[in-house]
């Protein structure tokens, strides 16, 4: 690994540490109130479906892509949609030097999948912090 790569990894880890501090302290809650639900890179973060809410299509068109993971659209439905959206935006900023027009699909898709996996196992009842920390752990894995 080059010195430049090592320095970038150290910078990203420092940024992730800062995000975790904001999650642990609860400061993220106020910040999340100002964030719109995330949409981008074939990922949508939304509130759970309620009455009079139209569902998103279950089947998505076939996707051809250069990304490394299986190309697919992901919709994460959680009562913590704003908190999760805040985290995805913060992580996008933390990894800004490493994300391009192709890798963003792998990056945000992997984070959304981590959220989906957590919600499938724990649901929303565990609260926002465990969800965010699970997704943050996935981001740490990406640093290498």
Image (cartoon, helix red, strand yellow):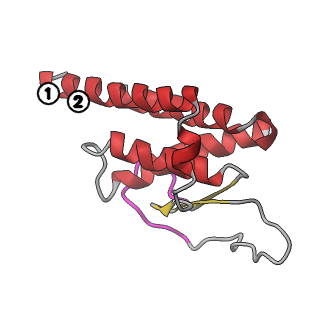
Q: Residue furthest left?
A: 3
Q: Are marks 1 and 2 in contact (CB under 8 Å)?
A: yes
Can residue 69 be seen by looking at this rendering? no
- The spot of residue 71 in percent (x, y) is 50, 58
- The spot of residue 84 in percent (x, y) is 58, 47
The residue at the point 38 percent across, 53 percent down is: 104
Give the magenta-colored segment's residue range.
62-72
From the viewer's perspective, tell me whether residue 125 is left or right of residue 104: right
Q: Residues within 10 Å of mark 1 (few under 14, many from 20)?
A: few
Element type at mark 2? helix
Main SS, magenta region, reads loop
**Disc 1/disc 2 C-alpha distance (Å):** 6 Å
Can residue 53 be seen by looking at this rendering? yes
Q: Residue furthest right?
A: 51
Q: The C terminus lies in which quarter of the figure? A: top left
Q: Which residue is mark 1?
A: 4
Q: Which residue is mark 2?
A: 8
- The spot of residue 107 in percent (x, y) is 43, 46
Q: How many marks?
A: 2
Q: The N terminus lies in which quarter of the figure? A: top left
């Amino acid at each position: 690994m080059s010195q430049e790569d090592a320095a970038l990894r150290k910078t990203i880890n420092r940024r992730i540490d800062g995000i975790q501090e904001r999650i642990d302290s609860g400061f993220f809650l106020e910040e999340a109130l100002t964030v719109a639900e995330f949409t981008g890179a074939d990922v949508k973060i939304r509130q759970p479906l309620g009455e009079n809410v139209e569902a998103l299509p279950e089947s998505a068109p076939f996707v051809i892509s250069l990304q490394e993971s299986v190309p697919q659209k992901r919709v994460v439905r959680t009562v913590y949609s704003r908190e999760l959206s805040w985290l995805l935006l913060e992580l996008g900023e933390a990894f800004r030097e490493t994300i391009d027009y192709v890798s963003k699909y792998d990056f945000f898709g992997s984070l959304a999948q981590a959220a989906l996996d957590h919600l499938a196992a724990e649901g929303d009842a565990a609260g926002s912090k465990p969800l965010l920390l699970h997704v943050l752990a996935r981001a740490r894995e990406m640093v290498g």
